[in-house]
Image: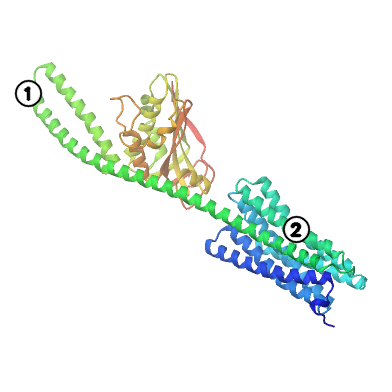
């Protein structure tokens, strides 16, 4: 027996009318969500797009479920289709959770959403089917029991996303406003379903007036529209956040490019000045060498010694300039950095002096690097010299050399590629570096020392040597408490005490043991 819409009960009219309109709204929002996810490809958008696709499919299937039950009076087909609807709604729960986690946390945990969605959908669909078919068989003339069971289970399913969203909002580290909007949207779906549960109690009761039927349909459609609007607002919040991060990254990149161009131009200037000065120094040294045999007066010889000393100092400065400008001739070799640092331990202790403590620790084993060995020594000497100048009498300078394996976040923090690195750490308990000049400490000719006490090339030379070797220099400083420089140089070969020799293709997360080899006070 078939019925027309006018001859249906008010319960079936509300059910069928709201189902048709909800399907139109759900399909429309699903299309918009899919377009946004396909264009922007953001985690929240992808998850919510899947939720809306499932919701749209469920709404379309629900049309046939309502039609078969109300118009065709085929209760078995209606129950089967309604079980599929509940299963589709349940399958969206993991995707709602993924969307809220992506909004709430910078790095949400990964999970296999498809498997979870299928598990949720099948489990809830089977529970619904068992319940409605059992109740329909046991009480075929009492339709209200099966209806309330079906709608009650659907209310539970639609309440879970609302609970997930509100919990994510409570614990969110970011996007709290967007999460609140999404939680309100999920709650609107749950409230809409609660209204359907209430209307389900009227099965078999006298019909409602047309105005009540229309009002019920409008409220249910508005609820699903509210969820759609809130989903779009959540997507917008995610995209705004991505644009802000890109903008900040672009600003930092532009600053790095500007700093690199400034360093390059200063390098070219330094190279030109160094070559000219070097030519002048060569003339002076040749002239003093030719005059020396003819001098008999001790005072004249002493003056000539002063000239020689000044030219040697000038030659050292020229060498620093050429090193900074990357035009200094290099002789890269494979050598053990541990052994090399042990060889200059006494020199580093003399650089610090007797009025301060110098503690030098070198890891046991071997860390082979490829670079000019003299430049490796220059790195250590320059950093120790800077540390000495930063401390007061009685202060402490600590030097540590070991091998570390950097992967993932540790490599990102050090701004180097993952792999094994020889790490040279020079720290002091001095006055630290003020925040306003930390970005300039590697610039050539920049110095905080008094006039005549520093050329401003020490750290610039260290940065240039390390960068050319494929490493990086890290800085940690607290004004008034001290400074810590970390130099990372790529290790070509590593031997850890008690372990077999490994290359950069054989990673180990275990740092080498450290042995203290020298200290002075």
Side of 410 relative to 493 (left or right): right
Residue at the extreme bottom of the image, as rendered: 1
Q: Position of residue 277 (x, y in %)?
A: 18, 35
Contact flag, marks 1 and 2 (Cβ < 8 Å): no
Q: Position of residue 145 (x, y in %)?
A: 89, 66
**Is residue 334 at least partly visible in the picture?**
no
Crowdedness near tag 2: few (<14), some (14–19) or many (≥20) residues, C-alpha within 10 Å: many
The residue depicted at 21 percent of the width and 38 percent of the height is: 273
Disc 1 target residue: 294
Disc 2 target residue: 190
Crowdedness near tag 1: few (<14), some (14–19) or many (≥20) residues, C-alpha within 10 Å: few
| Closer to the camera in the image, 20 or 310 | 20
SS label for mark 1 = helix
Q: Position of residue 520 (x, y in %)?
A: 43, 23
Q: Quadrant of the C terminus?
A: top left
Side of 221 relative to 296 (left or right): right
* 215 versus 331 height, above or below: below
| Closer to the camera in the image, 125 or 395 | 125
Dividing the picture into quarters, in which one does residue 117 lie? bottom right
The residue depicted at 41 percent of the width and 34 percent of the height is: 438
The residue depicted at 35 percent of the width and 45 percent of the height is: 258
Q: Quadrant of the N terminus?
A: bottom right
Q: CA distance from mark 1 to mark 2?
A: 106 Å
Q: Earlier in the sequence, mark 1 or mark 2?
A: 2
**Is residue 261 at least partly visible in the picture?**
yes
The residue depicted at 17 percent of the width and 33 percent of the height is: 281
């Amino acid at each position: 027996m078939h019925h027309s819409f006018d001859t249906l009960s008010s319960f079936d009219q509300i059910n069928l009318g709201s189902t048709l309109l909800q399907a139109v709204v759900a399909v429309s929002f699903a299309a918009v969500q899919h377009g946004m996810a396909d264009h922007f490809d953001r985690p929240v958008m992808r998850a919510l797009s899947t939720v809306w696709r499932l919701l749209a499919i469920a709404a379309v299937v629900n049309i046939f479920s309502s039609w078969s039950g109300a118009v065709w009076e085929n209760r078995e087909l209606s129950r089967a289709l309604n079980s599929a609807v509940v299963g589709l709604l349940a399958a969206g729960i993991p995707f709602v959770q993924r969307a809220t986690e992506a909004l709430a946390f910078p790095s949400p945990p990964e999970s296999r959403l498809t498997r979870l969605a299928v598990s949720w959908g099948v489990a809830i669909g089977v529970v619904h089917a068992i319940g409605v078919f059992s109740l329909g068989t046991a009480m075929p003339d009492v339709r209200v029991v099966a209806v309330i069971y079906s709608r009650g289970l659907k209310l539970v399913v639609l309440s879970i996303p609302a609970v997930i969203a509100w919990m994510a909002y409570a614990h969110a580290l970011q996007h709290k406003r967007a999460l609140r909007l999404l939680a309100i949207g999920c709650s609107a779906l749950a409230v809409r379903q609660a209204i359907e549960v209430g209307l389900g109690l009227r099965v078999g009761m006298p019909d409602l007036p047309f105005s009540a039927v229309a009002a019920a349909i409008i409220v249910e459609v508005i609820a699903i529209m509210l969820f759609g609007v809130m989903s779009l607002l959540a997507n917008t919040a995610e995209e705004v956040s991505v644009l802000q991060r890109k903008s900040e990254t672009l600003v930092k990149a532009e600053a790095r490019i500007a700093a690199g161009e400034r360093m390059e131009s200063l390098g070219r200037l330094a190279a030109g000045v160094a070559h000219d000065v070097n030519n002048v120094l060569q003339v002076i040294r040749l002239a003093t060498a030719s005059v020396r045999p003819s001098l008999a007066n001790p005072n004249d010889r002493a003056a000539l010694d002063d000239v020689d000393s000044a030219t040697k100092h000038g030659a050292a400065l020229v060498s620093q300039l050429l090193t900074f400008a990357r035009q200094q001739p290099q002789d890269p070799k494979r050598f053990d950095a541990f052994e090399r640092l042990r060889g200059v331990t006494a020199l580093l202790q003399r650089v610090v002096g007797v009025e301060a403590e110098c503690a030098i620790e070198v890891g046991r084993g071997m860390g082979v690097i490829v670079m000019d060995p003299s430049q490796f020594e220059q790195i250590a000497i320059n950093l120790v010299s800077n540390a000495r100048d930063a401390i007061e009498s009685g202060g402490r300078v600590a030097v540590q050399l070991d091998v570390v394996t950097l992967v993932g976040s540790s490599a990102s923090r050090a701004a180097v590629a993952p792999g094994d690195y020889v790490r040279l750490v020079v720290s002091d308990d001095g006055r630290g570096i003020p925040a306003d000049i930390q970005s300039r400490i590697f610039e050539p000719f920049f110095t905080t020392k008094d006039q005549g006490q520093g050329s401003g090339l020490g750290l610039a030379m260290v940065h240039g040597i390390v960068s050319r070797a494929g490493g990086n220099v890290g800085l940690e400083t607290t004004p008034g408490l001290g400074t810590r420089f970390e130099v990372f140089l790529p290790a070509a070969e590593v031997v850890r005490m008690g372990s077999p020799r490994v290359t950069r293709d054989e990673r180990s997360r275990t740092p080498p043991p450290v042995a203290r080899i020298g200290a002075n006070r």
